[in-house]
Image (spheres, helix red, strand yellow):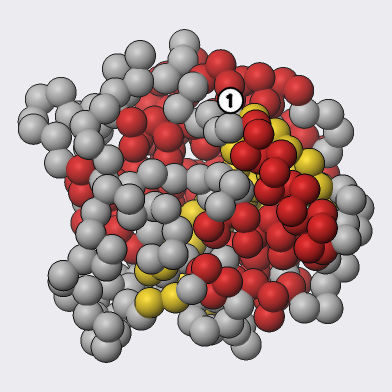
């Protein structure tokens, strides 16, 4: 299988990637679009003429951002939607209220290294928010994605996935002490595994699904539970990680959501606007074998169906 390359790279911005595109008639949903990478992704898609729904945990915040994007892009087809990924009822309501085809779904929202918390159903919060909520959303919108005929699902993961697999025997940390970073790694591995399995299951429906690592961006609110940047951060990039701004961090999401350069590509993992190679120990790049293992992907899908069937 040929590794996908593009003319863009780590320093490319969302504006660079979207330049010259016409997304008129295409409808998009971006989760976590009230700030950071989600806002920039939504803005870029709207700037190319797409009808974009800014999905946020707070409707007022989503409405404010939608209005800002309309003012910035001149595209009046930018709307707000309420979506709390940790609340199964909110996810179900969002999917049930959708009407018509959906061409682009960007599963961007996420939380990182939070103190130990569980949902009312007992799910560990990072797993519930970063994976299960997005899983339920994508499955709930499957018919709309199918109706588009050529839909794209973009899943924002992280290089943090290399730090650990899905803990199938203790995904809620009920047997062993909670570790915020292992919980984050698990949720980000789950994002990649979702893309692997959904790509296979939904290929006949014309839906492509890819995951990505946006890079290290300190300007977002994702790192609110950690030092920013941490003392261990190496600004030289020797570990394979370089710091990006928000516009650069959103570039790979926009590429996968809209570019002809990845037309028909599915079930892959990207970083810096290129398909990533295998992860090598000691380097904060690439995709870990445990995150693209087909047996893990199938097992996670079955587990996710069970966990979301009666609420998270």
Question: Percent position (x, y) of residue 48?
Answer: 83, 66
Question: Percent position (x, y) of residue 50?
Answer: 83, 56
Callout 1 crowding tier (Cα within 10 Å): few <14, some 14–19, many ≥20: many
72 relative to 306 in the view: left or right: right
In the picture, which quadrant includes the C terminus? top left
Question: Percent position (x, y) of residue 134?
Answer: 52, 37
> Residue 205: in sight, yes or no?
no
Residue at screen point 65% across, 34% down: 60
Q: Nearer the viewer, residue 216 or 201?
A: 216
Q: Is residue 242 above or below residue 278?
A: below
6 relative to 290 in the view: left or right: right
Question: Percent position (x, y) of residue 304?
Answer: 43, 28
Instruction: Report the number of numbered marks.
Output: 1
**Residue farthest top in this picture:** 310
* Residue marked by disc 1: 91
Q: Is residue 67 above or below residue 140?
A: below
Res 230 quadrant in image: bottom left
Res 161 quadrant in image: bottom left
Residue at screen point 44% across, 45% down: 110
Q: Nearer the viewer, residue 221 or 158?
A: 221
Residue at screen point 51% across, 45% down: 109
């Amino acid at each position: 299988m040929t590794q996908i390359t593009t003319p863009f790279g780590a320093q490319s911005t969302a504006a660079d990637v979207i330049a010259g595109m016409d997304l008129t008639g295409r409808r998009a949903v971006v989760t976590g679009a009230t700030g950071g990478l989600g806002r920039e992704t939504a803005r870029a898609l709207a700037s190319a003429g797409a009808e974009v729904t800014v999905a946020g945990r707070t409707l007022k915040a989503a409405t404010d951002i939608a209005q800002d994007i309309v003012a910035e892009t001149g595209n009046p087809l930018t709307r707000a939607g309420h979506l709390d990924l940790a609340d199964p009822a909110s996810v179900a309501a969002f999917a049930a209220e959708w009407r018509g085809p959906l061409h682009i779904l960007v599963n961007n929202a996420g939380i990182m290294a939070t103190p130990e918390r569980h949902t009312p159903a007992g799910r560990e919060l990072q797993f519930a928010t970063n994976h299960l909520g997005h899983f339920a959303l994508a499955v709930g919108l499957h018919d709309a994605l199918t109706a588009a005929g050529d839909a794209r699902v973009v899943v924002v993961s992280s290089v943090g996935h290399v730090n650990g697999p899905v803990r199938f025997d203790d995904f809620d940390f009920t047997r062993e002490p909670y570790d915020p970073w292992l919980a984050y790694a698990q949720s980000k591995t789950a994002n990649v595994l979702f893309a692997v399995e959904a790509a296979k299951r939904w290929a006949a429906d014309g839906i492509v699904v890819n995951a990505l690592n946006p890079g290290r961006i300190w300007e977002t609110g994702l790192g609110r539970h950690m030092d920013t940047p941490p003392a261990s951060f190496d600004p030289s990039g020797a570990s394979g990680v370089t710091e990006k701004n928000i516009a650069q961090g959103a570039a790979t999401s926009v590429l996968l959501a809209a570019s002809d350069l990845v037309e028909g590509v599915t079930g892959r993992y990207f970083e810096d606007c290129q398909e990533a190679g295998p992860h090598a120990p000691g380097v904060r790049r690439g995709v870990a074998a445990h995150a693209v293992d087909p047996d893990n992907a199938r097992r996670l899908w079955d587990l996710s169906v069970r966990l979301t069937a009666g609420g998270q």
